[in-house]
Amino acid sequence: MDTSTIFSRLQFAFTISFHYLFPQFTMGLALLLVILKVLYVWRKDERYNSSAHFWGKIFAISFVFGVVTGIPMEFQFGTNWARFSAYSGEIIAQTLAMEGAFAFFLESAFLGIFLFGEQVFGQKMHLFSAIMLWLGTWASGGFIIATNSWMQHPVGYTMTPDGKLHLTNYWAVLFNPWIIPDFMHAISGAVISAAFVMTGLGAYYLLAKQHYDYARIFVTIGVIVGLIASAFQLFPTGDMEGSQVTAYQPTKLAAMEGLFQTESGAGIVIIGQPDMATGRLDNPIIVPDVLSVLTYRRWTAQVKGLNAFPPNQRP
């Protein structure tokens, strides 16, 4: 691999990793804002409304940082991956444009109403703005995840005579079978992130003996929502993600698990050092048979190793 490709990957990895800190937090926090507003409307307890306003301000700050860090990430499709963009731009540009044209503007408009419109529009509209903000953030994530899902499992296209990809079915791209587990897994992870940030702040207030009433709300809602989302992250969404990789990307599965030789009753590796030159995993700690169960639901199922695939097809 040439040096420019290595540095392009490192730069893009840093850019997208730093960017994703903010949208994953806002996607999760949007749901928590709705919960706080619903509790206020239901119980008429001003503490829930004050909590919603407090976290709404934090949401706005994270939203701004998400926008600022997302712009250079999209630029890098052209600066770092120009050939890929020219090859598949007709397809990936559709979902990215839809995210900006619909979801982003939906978020922006209702975020303004949520932050500044309560006194003007009343409580019902304020709750409605929270719901629309939540839907907008999740729609935004959905369009981005649709782009990634198409990259993992391309559908709805043909190849033109000049070697570029031509979109033939936009709905196939949006309803790619890969997107459902991708979206649910990513969203549950976002909810976990926001829930435990809320829990952490509440725990800090409890230890510092400050804002006790609000601390109890933060910890209670954060722990309950976080635990539910954590369970959902494992099953069914995590299990569905694993099944998708097994069905469509067996080489990736073998690489992820450090499995070089095809095995029946393959174990899952806890730790080990892959040696690509010799095609073996050094100093492994393995739990027997577990990988076969996770992928094919059978203790003795055969899982293909990297050595079963030509070198040019390996990740």
Image (cartoon, helix red, strand yellow):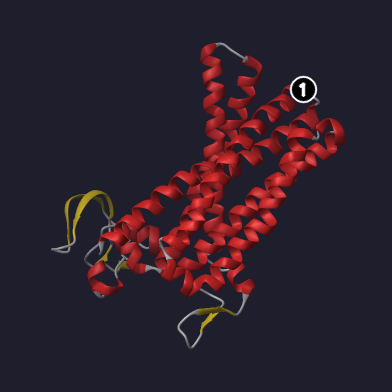
Query: As drawn, which residue projects farthest toward the front?
Result: 79
Query: As drawn, which residue projects farthest toward the right?
Result: 121
Tell which of 54 and 216 is nearer to you.
54
Secondary structure at numbered mark 1: helix
- Residue type at tag 1: Glu
Compared across the picture, whether 163 is left or right of 5 comes to right
Query: As drawn, which residue projects farthest toward the left?
Result: 278
Residue 305 in which image quadrant = bottom left
Q: Where, quadrant-wise, is the C terminus in this rendering? A: bottom left
Q: Residue at x 24, y 72 (%)?
A: 311
Q: Can residue 262 be seen at all in this image of the molecule? A: no
Reading the image, the residue beneath label 1 is 46
Q: Residue at x 77, y 22 (%)?
A: 46
Q: x, y percentage for residue 109?
A: 74, 46
Count residues near mark 1 (Cα–Cα under 10 Å), then give few for <14, some for 14-19, many for 20+. few
Q: Residue at x 42, y 64 (%)?
A: 81
Q: Where, quadrant-wise, is the N terminus in this rendering? A: bottom left
Q: x, y percentage for residue 133?
A: 70, 45
Tell which of 72 and 301 is nearer to you.
72
Q: x, y percentage for residue 285?
A: 22, 48
